[in-house]
Amino acid sequence: MSIKPLVILPDPILRKVSKPIERVDQPLQKLADDMLETMYEAPGIGLAAIQIGEPLRLLVIDVAGKDEPKEPRVFINPQILWRSDEPNVYEEGCLSIPDYYAEVERPKRVRVSYLDREGKESEIEADGLLATCLQHEIDHLNGVLFIDHISRLKRDMVIRKFKKLAKEKAQSGARL
């Protein structure tokens, strides 16, 4: 397994819609393992393949608490089948938007179909943090970021900040 570099805002790849996975094979399973290692190292609770530059409909999640055993989950071609009408608000962050957090309202529960790590068709009904995390990561597969769910004013401020940081990083790298 290996840790992959994270794609950071304002990289335009984050806005790409990811392609469905045609075949579950060993290279895909290795990619999922690499994603889990990258997510744990970051540290985070979810990671979509697009966040490491792979525009594939693949995501990994582990919402186990710090003192709980790890519960890594792999979702291939996940699709939301149903959303509850009842809302839930969580303070969200994103490995591709480091050190920025905002409250986001999403449906409290979802039902998601997906292929598991072995390629078996599966379905999960999730609530709470797992439901929020699934929605956040599936958004990534559709080119949507959590900041798209906050006010335009706040979103524009975040985007400006990250564009400025990227420009400063590029300029300092050019001087080395």
Image (cartoon, grey):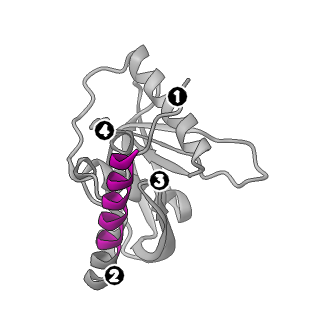
Cβ–Cβ under 8 Å for marks 1 and 3: no
Span shown in magenta: 158-176
Q: Earlier in the sequence, mark 2 or mark 1?
A: 1
What is the crowding at mark 4: few (fewer than 14 residues within 10 Å), some, or many (at least 20)? many
* Residue 28 visible in the current orientation: yes
Give the number of marks: 4
User: Residue reaching furthest top?
Assistant: 26
Q: Earlier in the sequence, mark 4 or mark 3?
A: 4
- State the separation of the CA atoms marked 4 and 2: 28 Å
User: Residue reaching furthest front?
Assistant: 175
What is the crowding at mark 2: few (fewer than 14 residues within 10 Å), some, or many (at least 20)? few
Picture disc at residue 33: 1
Q: Is 101 situated left or right of 111 in this image?
A: right
Tag in front: 2 or 1: 2
Amino acid type, callout 2: Lys
Residue 7 screen position, x and y as percent = 37, 47
For the point 29% across and 47% down, which residue is it? 141
Residue 111 screen position, x and y as percent = 40, 54
Residue of label 4 = 57
- State the separation of the CA atoms marked 4 and 1: 15 Å
Image quarter hosting the C terminus: top left
Tag in front: 4 or 1: 1
Tag in front: 3 or 2: 2
**Picture quarter containing residue 151?**
bottom left
Residue of label 2 = 154
Amino acid type, callout 4: Arg
Residue of label 3 = 125
User: Is residue 168 in the magenta section?
Assistant: yes
Tag in front: 4 or 2: 2
Asked whether 37 or 167 is in front, the reply is 167
Q: Is residue 8 above or below residue 28?
A: below
Amino acid type, callout 1: Asp
